[in-house]
Amino acid sequence: MRLAPARSVVDSEEERALTDPFGVEGKVTIVTGGGTGIGAAIAREFALRGAPVIIASRKAEHLEPTRDALRKAGGRCELFVCDVRDAAACEALVGEAVRHFGRLDVLVNNHGASIAAPSLALSPNAWRAVVAINLDGTFLCSKAAAKRFIEQQGPGCIINLSSIAGIDGSSTMIPYAAAKAAVIKLTESHASEWGPLGIRVNCIAPGPIETEGAASRAWPNERVREAVRLSRALGRFGRVEEIAYPCVFLASAAANYVNGATLVVDGGRVREAEVIQALAK
Ligand code: NAP
């Protein structure tokens, strides 16, 4: 593992593109939802490559074990308790990154939440909560980060987590699918708004990834779990690091010309009729 101080990425970006195009060493990185599941893996992969990391979410008990494990492994990690629906908290989160590490280079909007319920049973509050976390939270964190990137006179990098539900829709997680679709368009909009300022904004749309949070919400029993597995051309669930690695790529100089993209990381799709046939065997 290589550790490095949070040096000026602005000064070294061109040099880095030549010498270490896939590196993120020294890039100060915020990972929202960074205490659990995919977010914890993203935080780990950045920290182990020498990026100072701040992980943030609502519950300290989600963040503390991840921070402690990363520090034990030799990484630089701080935590910040906040709710991404609160604009002032998002500003404070960026302030914490600057207070601890002197600057901000990368924001990973990994936070997310969903409710599985039929539309007719969904209360306005439940709809609002899911859209507010997934969409408003991504906008508010992005705005706070972009403000800082502009103060630093660029560059900056934002990576948003959408979902294949945001591409295909979902018959069970309606507000989640709608909000994740909007995250893809927010990505494209911010990429074109902020690209001229040197801020790249990209998106990853994961397929089914083995995490506790997703398992309880999206494949709560063995029958659904098997159907989800069969729906992937690779015939398996994804692993958390298989989302973290593309995040590292998108934050690295190797992706310096990638802006406004949505990278689908889902193991490949099998047609629904073929899944039904396979389940019937
Ligand atoms: P997870 O473990 O449940 O992660 C969600 C994280 O978001 C938690 O750490 C949670 O922490 C945080 N969070 C929720 N509401 C928040 C709020 N209001 N403010 C701040 N943080 C908040 O689920 P995951 O599977 O790792 O998912 C990570 C991301 O990938 C999500 O955006 C998800 O939609 C996306 N994704 C996952 C899959 C999959 O199959 N796993 C597939 C497609 C997309 P607190 O509870 O402490 O706030």
Image (tube, grey):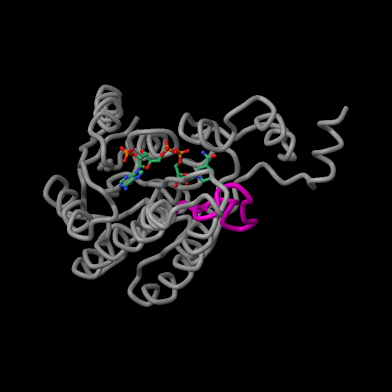
- Quadrant for ligand 1 reads top left
Residue at image position (63%, 51%) is: 171
Where is 42 relative to 9, above or below? Answer: above
Quadrant where the C terminus is found in the figure: top right
In the image, residue 68 sits, relative to residue 12, either above or below, namely: above
Viewed as shown, does residue 131 lie left or right of 155? right
**In the foreground, 8 or 175:** 175
In the image, is residue 165 part of the stretch drawn in magenta? yes
**Magenta-tinted stretch:** 160-176
The number of numbered discs placed on residues in the rendered structure image is 0
In front here: 122 or 223? 122
In the image, residue 228 lies at what x, y percent? 68, 36
Q: Residue at x 42, y 34 (%)?
A: 41
Q: Is residue 252 in view?
A: no
Q: Quadrant of residue 52?
A: top left
Location of the N terminus by quadrant is top left
Residue 81 picture quarter: top left
Question: Could you tell me residue 229's position as x and y percent?
Answer: 69, 33
Q: Quadrant of residue 12?
A: bottom left
In the visual, does 255 lie left or right of 28?
Answer: right
- Give the image location of residue 280, x and y in percent: 86, 30
